[in-house]
Amino acid sequence: MGYILMGALGFGFLLLFDLLSMNAKSYFKYVFGISGFLLIILNSVFIIRNFSEMTFSIWTRMIGGIFSVIFLVLLIYSVFIEVGKKTYGLKTEFKLVTTGTYALSRHPGVLWFFMLYLCGYLLFQNQFVLYAGLVWTGINIIYVFIQERFIFYKIFEGYDCYQKSTPMIIPNYQSFEKCITTLNWRIT
């Protein structure tokens, strides 16, 4: 339970990173950004180390492993690559991304994160991976609600139009189609 709480604290640090980025607190924001990611990653590793007494078939574990890799790649792509390097630079340049996975939903990272932990549960045969994924996804949803309510409308011009045209987390047919047609897989 302690690992899940410490990972949850990571999302609080990521929110502080966002707030400091918005207020041009250049260097100090990295303390919270790096700490937030490290808390989530390290506590995930600690949770994975503690195996449950579950016995999934080798095929279930293999499928979980393959999809875990796919969702990890999608998470990294959406959160770090697709938004561009300038988002995480010392002098943050905020640019609204509405194409690719951000045409699928306004917060594709939440979707990839949840699916990563769901598949990780199958791969590692560990019920605590599932519990952490559920709790952290809930916290992640609260985090993106805060971003939408207090941050994004201030830093992104036209965010209100983007909100109207793209689902928040769960994709629909139109957003899926727009994602496929606008995905470019290039590093910006």
Image (cartoon, helix red, strand yellow):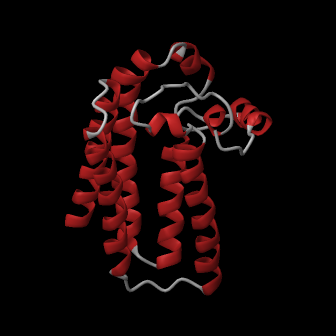
Q: Residue 23: x percent and y percent?
A: 29, 24
Question: Which residue corresponds to the image point at 53% horizontal and 40% vertical from the top-left?
Answer: 85
Name the quadrant containing residue 173: top right
Q: Is residue 103 left or right of residue 47?
A: right
> Viewer-proximal residue, 25 or 119?
25
State which quarter of the image contains the N terminus: bottom left
Question: Which residue corresponds to the image point at 54% horizontal and 52% vertical from the top-left?
Answer: 76
Name the quadrant containing residue 172: top right
Residue sticking out furthest to the right: 181
Task: Classify 106 as above or below 121.
Answer: above
> Viewer-proximal residue, 17 or 53?
17
Q: Looking at the image, can residue 110 be seen? A: yes
Q: Is residue 178 left or right of residue 41?
A: right
State which quarter of the image contains the C terminus: top right
Task: Classify 53 as above or below 123.
Answer: below
Question: Which residue corresponds to the image point at 54% horizontal and 66% vertical from the top-left?
Answer: 119
Question: Which residue corresponds to the image point at 24% horizontal and 51% vertical from the top-left?
Answer: 9
Q: Is residue 116 left or right of residue 129?
A: right
Q: How many marks?
A: 0
Q: Residue 95: x percent and y percent?
A: 54, 25
Residue sticking out furthest to the left: 2
Q: Residue 177: x percent and y percent?
A: 77, 35
Q: Is residue 36 left or right of residue 59?
A: left
Q: Looking at the image, can residue 107 be seen? A: no
Task: Classify 174 as above or below 49.
Answer: above
Task: Classify 27 as above or below 57.
Answer: above
